[in-house]
Image (spheres, rainbow, N blue to C red):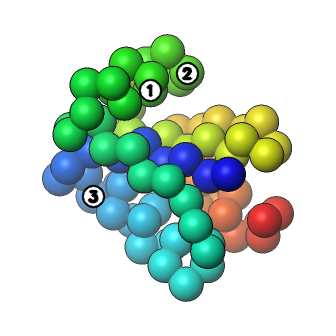
Amino acid sequence: MLILYTSNNCPFCEKVKDSFLGKMSSYEERNISESEEYKKELIKKGGKQQVPFLIDTSANVMMYESDDILDYLNEGVF
């Protein structure tokens, strides 16, 4: 399962979300601007309040940085 932490007005988040279109059948978006719970989860899991943040629960992978996330998605490990 892919979980993507995002926030409103984040161009890097939009860049990653655009990449998901047509490639990934499903992912869960967790917007920290709209949920204090998601913000706390992000800090607990990643250590900081930076978005985008991707978690691939099936591969135990977590990463920040939109370009790193895009590289990971383009590897086609799904």
Element class at badge 2: helix
Residue 72 left/right relative to 18: right
Residue 14 left/right relative to 73: left
Instruction: Say which label, 3 or 1, has the lower sequence index.
Output: 3
Q: Residues within 10 Å of mark 1 (few under 14, many from 20)?
A: many
Looking at the rendered structure, the kind of residue marked 3 is Pro
- Residue beneath the point at 25% across and 33% down: 35
Quarter assignment of residue 70: bottom right
> Looking at the picture, how far across and down is residue 54, in whole percent?
56, 44
As drawn, the label of residue 45 is 2
- Residue beneath the point at 31% across and 44% down: 31
Element class at badge 3: helix
**Quick one: 29 or 6, which is closer to the camera?**
29
> Looking at the picture, how far across and down is residue 27, in whole percent?
55, 59
Q: Gap in Å between the C-alphas at discs 3 and 1?
A: 18 Å
Please, which residue is most extreme toward the bottom here? 22
Quarter assignment of residue 67: bottom right
> Looking at the picture, how far across and down is residue 7, in whole percent?
27, 44
Q: Is residue 48 visible?
A: no
Q: Residues within 10 Å of mark 3 (few under 14, many from 20)?
A: few
- Residue beneath the point at 66% across and 63% down: 73
Are circles 2 and 1 on residues that touch, CB within 8 Å? yes
Q: Gap in Å between the C-alphas at discs 2 and 3?
A: 22 Å
> Looking at the picture, how far across and down is residue 63, in whole percent?
60, 38
Residue of label 3:
11
